Amino acid sequence: FGAGFMDAKRREAVAARPALRARREALERERAAAAAEWAPGADVIPWLRQLGFRADEARRGAAACSGLADAPLEDRVRHALRTLARRGPRRMDPPDRLLAAAVLTPLHP
């Protein structure tokens, strides 16, 4: 590549900077808008699903946490678990199932 070619590439890069900056700022605005639309308690849903709750139950638990936006994630998950446990009997609530597995599993086979 010659000096003329590299000079042309540099001029193209300088000319493209404002368009790239505008595109980056537009993407940042879109991300911020999407984050604002995200339900306040939605970050607990994956944790509830991992514990064995169905999607509708996890959404219901997340909705119960919407007023706890400033609380730590652990507290919001606990609140969702308490809310879901009050909903009525199930086979076994996920925390009880995990506890039963831990208690009933022998330490040494």
Image (spheres, helix red, strand yellow):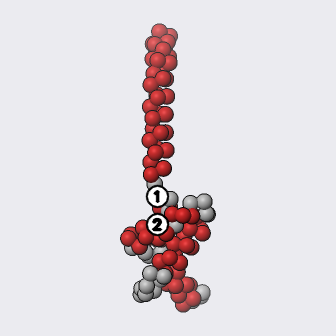
What residue did someone put label 2 on? Answer: 63
The amino acid beneath tag 2 is Ala
Quarter holding the C terminus?
A: bottom right
Q: Is residue 66 above or below residue 5?
A: below
Nearest the eye: 18 or 78 = 78
Q: CA distance from mark 1 to mark 2?
A: 8 Å
Question: Residue 2: in sight, yes or no?
Answer: no
Question: Residue 103: in sight, yes or no?
Answer: yes
Residue at left 46%, top 66%? 63
Residue at left 57%, top 88%? 103
Nearest the eye: 59 or 47 = 59
Disc 1 vs disc 2: Cβ atoms closer than 8 Å? yes
| Marked residue nearer the N-terminal end (1 or 2) | 1
Nearest the eye: 13 or 47 = 47
What residue did someone put label 1 on? Answer: 39
Q: Position of residue 54 (x, y in %)?
A: 39, 73
Residue 91 is drawn in which quadrant? bottom left
Number of numbered callouts drawn: 2
Secondary structure category for the residue under label 1: loop
Mark 1 Cα shell of 10 Å, populated few (<14), some (14-19), many (≥20) = some
